[in-house]
Image (spheres, rainbow, N blue to C red):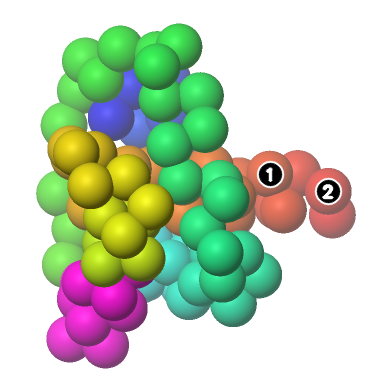
């Protein structure tokens, strides 16, 4: 993930009161929001080619999130069979989406 996105994620987790171990929950909720509000996954991959993924981050997803990501990968692969890094792109899109929605409040 881009370092700037990782930094914004950390700030949002802290500002939203999720605490030190709340990042995984924040990301799980972000994935749920993305799948509910963007079922066609139009936000996945948008802008990814404009940024360098120069940082890594780790979080734990629920089984439900994992299954939803697997289904989303199938949707994207049906449209773009040669797409790579889809799971990571979905997580980045979810984080960006939630940050945008958070900024609207």
Q: Which class describes the residues within 10 Å of circle 1: few (<14), some (14-19), or many (20+)?
A: few
Q: Position of residue 70 (x, y in %)?
A: 21, 72
Residue at the location (31% across, 60% down)?
78
The answer to whether residue 67 is magenta is yes
Picture quadrant where residue 50 is located: top left
For residue 75, side relative to residue 74 (left or right): right
Q: Are marks 2 and 1 in contact (CB under 8 Å)?
A: yes
Image spot of residue 65 (x, y percent):
28, 78
- As for residue 24 lying within the magenta part, the answer is no
Magenta region: 61-72
Left or right, 68 with reference to 57: right
Which is more toward the observer, 46 or 18? 46
Above or below 33: residue 11:
above
Mark linked to residue 100:
1
Q: Is disc 2 placed on a helix, strand or loop?
A: helix
Whether residue 5 is visible, yes or no, is yes
- The quarter of the picture where residue 85 lies is top left
Crowd tier of the residue under label 2, counting other residues whose Cα lies within 10 Å: few below 14, some 14–19, many 20 or above = few
| Disc 2 from disc 1: Cα separation | 7 Å
Q: In the depicted view, which residue is nearer to us: 101 or 42?
A: 42
Q: Which residue bears the numbered disc 2?
A: 104
Q: Nearer the viewer, residue 2 or 9?
A: 2
Give the residue at x 23% y 47%: 81
Query: 63 or 67, which lies in front?
Result: 67
- Quarter of the picture holding the N terminus: top left
Furthest-bottom residue in view? Answer: 64
Which quarter of the figure is the C terminus placed in? bottom right
Q: Is residue 20 visible?
A: no
Q: Is residue 44 left or right of residue 82?
A: right
């Amino acid at each position: 993930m881009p370092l700037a996105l990782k930094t914004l994620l950390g700030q949002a987790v802290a500002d939203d009161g999720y605490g030190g171990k709340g990042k995984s929950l924040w990301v799980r909720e972000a994935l749920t929001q993305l799948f509910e509000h963007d079922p066609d996954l139009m936000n996945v991959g948008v802008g990814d080619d404009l940024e360098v993924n120069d940082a890594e981050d780790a979080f734990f997803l629920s089984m439900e999130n994992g299954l939803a990501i697997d289904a989303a990968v199938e949707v994207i692969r049906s449209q773009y069979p040669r797409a790579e890094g889809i799971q990571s792109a979905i997580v980045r899109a979810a984080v960006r989406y939630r940050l945008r929605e958070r900024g609207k409040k």
